[in-house]
Amino acid sequence: MLRCNHCKVDLPGNQKRCPLCQKKPIGTPDGSGNPFPHLPEPRLPVSRILIAWMAFGSVCAAAICIIINMILPSGGWWSLFVIAGIGSLWVDFALMMKKRKNLPKNILWQVISISLIAVFWDFLTGFSGWSLDFVFPILCSCAMIAMAIVAKVRRLDTQDYILYLMIDCILGIVCFILMLTGAVHVVIPSAVSFGISIVFLAFLLFFEGKALWAEIQRRLHL
């Protein structure tokens, strides 16, 4: 009979591993059959395998860029920008996966994270203002429309999206403030975002005012 010296137990049947400690037993099988059920090898879900391959591909791309940059250094250290771009992509992707169960909240966080990343890249490239002129107001406008569509298609309860939509409306008003202070040089995207914010905010106040106040009280424990 097989025996596990680590656990000090006899193992009937033909066990390749001890079911307790997974160590290899010693001795001779007694031929009585395996009394333990066969457990299949656990499989990783497809999403985790895909993410692992994406991470591996990102590392390979960064390594190839560094090698090429070291061989041809005349263009400066452009590979650092590639690495920073890959890092920015993964930061945003990680945030998206973390908030994936709440779509309105995910949309709002995407507006904030992508805007901050855009400002960061704008600063690295000399801060020409494209992050505030185009990225931030366009994201705010698209987010408000996306939240309304998601709420309609998925038939969400009002309290599931109303606070996030209001915050995004406030961010649209921030675009107008940036326009007044002269921080924005291209007026059209910020003006459109401000107009959409006013329309959505008016709708929330006139038609969902009680639900909005109740949600604010619940969130702030008033």
Image: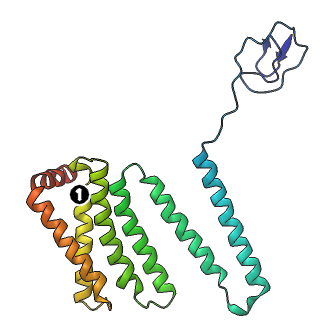
Q: Quadrant of residue 60?
A: bottom right
Instruction: Identify the residue at image location x=17%, y=69%.
Output: 199
**Hey, what amino acid is under mark 1?**
Leu
Q: Which residue is mark 1?
A: 163
Instruction: Identify the residue at image location x=62%, y=52%.
Output: 50
Looking at the figure, which quarter contains the N terminus? top right
- Residue 114 is left or right of residue 25, and the answer is left
Instruction: Identify the residue at image location x=22%, y=76%.
Output: 173
Q: Quadrant of residue 86?
A: bottom right
Instruction: Identify the residue at image location x=85%, y=14%.
Output: 2
| Circle 1 Cα neighbour tier, 10 Å, few/some/many (<14 / 14–19 / ≥20) | many
Name, please, the residue furthest toward the right: 28
Expressed as whole percent of the image width and height from the top left, the position of residue 220 reads 20, 54
* Callout count: 1
Name, please, the residue furthest toward the top: 32
- Residue 65 is left or right of residue 211, and the answer is right
49 or 92: nearer the eye? Answer: 49
- Residue 72 is left or right of residue 174, and the answer is right
- Residue 210 is left or right of residue 2, and the answer is left
Circle 1 SS class:
helix
156 or 173: nearer the eye? Answer: 156
Expressed as whole percent of the image width and height from the top left, the position of residue 183 reads 31, 89
Applied colour scheme: rainbow
Where 22 falls versus 170 (above or below)? above
Where 75 falls versus 116 (above or below)? below
Expressed as whole percent of the image width and height from the top left, the position of residue 31 reads 86, 8
